[in-house]
Image: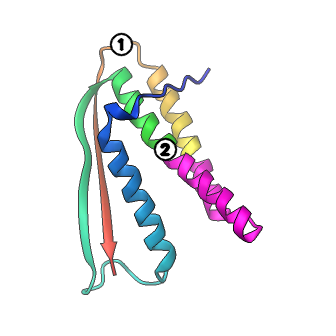
Amino acid sequence: MNKIRFINKNKLPLLRTFVELLKRNENHMSKTNPLTKPDTPHAKSKTITLIDSDYQSLEAEEVIHDLILSKIKFLRQKQFSNMERFGHKSAHLSQRASQLQQELNELQQLLDCQNNPEQVLTIQCEIKISVN
């Protein structure tokens, strides 16, 4: 049985920054040429360390769940918006939301196998943003 816990977003102000960066990145990526390589000499990039910490098992689960669920929600809202405005679904958005849901399910299975709720997990998450 999958258990999904929601946390109060006021406890994770970093989450808001992450979601805003994802939105800006998605908007930027939809406007750029997909054939342009981000490693060109004219490219500018920035790496943001979003998470770099140790968490107890339950706390780590909450952090990861909330981040992934926020991204899935964003993709579904974008999908709904496309459906309303253009009358069609984006295969990419549907596929990406499904991929993230599958990753979340697999993560839940991994964490459910942990017998020790005091187990410490290290989470590292970086976001790389390239401007072409």
Q: Residue at x 48, y 83 (%)?
A: 33
Instruction: Locate the C terminus and report the quarter of the image it occupies.
Output: bottom left
Question: SS of the residue at dot 2?
Answer: helix
Main secondary structure type of the part rendered in magenta: helix
Q: Residue at x 27, y 27 (%)?
A: 55
Q: Position of residue 84 (x, y in %)?
A: 73, 63
Horizontal arrangement in the rendering, residue 91 relative to residue 4 (left or right): right
Q: Is residue 44 visible?
A: yes
Q: Position of residue 109 (x, y in %)?
A: 52, 27
Q: Residue at x 48, y 28 (%)?
A: 6
Residue at numbered disc 2: 70
Residue 76 on the magenta segment: yes
Image: 130 above or below 3: below
Horizontal arrangement in the rendering, residue 109 relative to residue 11 (left or right): right
Q: Position of residue 51 (x, y in %)?
A: 27, 43
Question: SS of the residue at dot 1?
Answer: loop
Image: 59 above or below 42: above
Relative depth, front residue between 43 and 111? 43
Q: Is residue 89 visible?
A: no
Residue at numbered disc 1: 116
Which range is magenta?
Answer: 70-99
Kind of residue indicated by mark 2: Ser
Relative depth, front residue between 115 and 5? 5
Residue 95 on the magenta segment: yes
Disc 1: CA contacts within 10 A as few (<14), some (14-19) or many (>=20): few
Disc 2: CA contacts within 10 A as few (<14), some (14-19) or many (>=20): some
Q: Residue at x 49, y 25 (%)?
A: 5
Name, please, the residue furthest toward the right: 87
Kind of residue indicated by mark 1: Asn
